[in-house]
Image (tube, helix red, strand yellow):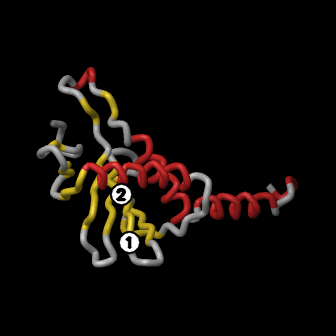
Amino acid sequence: MTGLAGPVLQGPRTLRVHCVWMSRAQSHAFMDLVSTLAARAASESMPWTVAAECSYALASPSGEVVVITSKDQDDVAPFTLELFAPSGALVELLVSRWEGDEPEYATPAPWNDNLESIYQNARTAALGIDSVINGFVSFINSFDAERF
């Protein structure tokens, strides 16, 4: 049994993450989705959108939606990743956290790095950060040294 945000064993074949129930196979498939999303988000231009302050969404053509959020609205951990069905029903929820009984010996959950990577890449894409920076650099470079 693990803490609040992690999987809790509820019998031989099911895992519970908060109020979302999944089979072990479904839970492993979701963790594979998280790993794949983290790996591809850094290298591909995905159509992330701003969902709310410090919250970004990626929707599939068939209507599934992933939402990544900085829980404290400060662009740093803890992060929450939610997967919604086309109907809007919450399918899965994953929260970054620390594991261990003693705070000084706690270790980050294995998925924390993936959630951080997804969040940073989603933020960059949704806000068009690279374009904003490049645009401002071009603006600055348009001035010659004598004008400053």
The residue singled out by tag 1 in the image is 64
Q: Position of residue 112 (x, y in %)?
A: 38, 41
- 120 with respect to 12 (left or right): right
Crowd around label 2: few <14 · some 14–19 · many ≥20 (10 Å): many
- 22 with respect to 84 (left or right): left
Rendered image quadrant of residue 73 = bottom left
Which of pointers 1 and 2 indicates the residue nearer the eye? 1
Crowd around label 1: few <14 · some 14–19 · many ≥20 (10 Å): some
Residue at 49% x, 58% y is 123
Q: Is residue 2 visible?
A: yes
- 132 with respect to 145 (left or right): left
The quadrant in which the C terminus is found is bottom right
| Front-lying residue, 61 or 58 | 61
Mark sitting earlier along the chain (1/2): 1
Residue at the left extreme? 11
- 101 with respect to 136 (left or right): left
Residue type at the position of mark 2: Thr
Residue at 55% x, 54% y is 40
Residue 69 circle label: 2
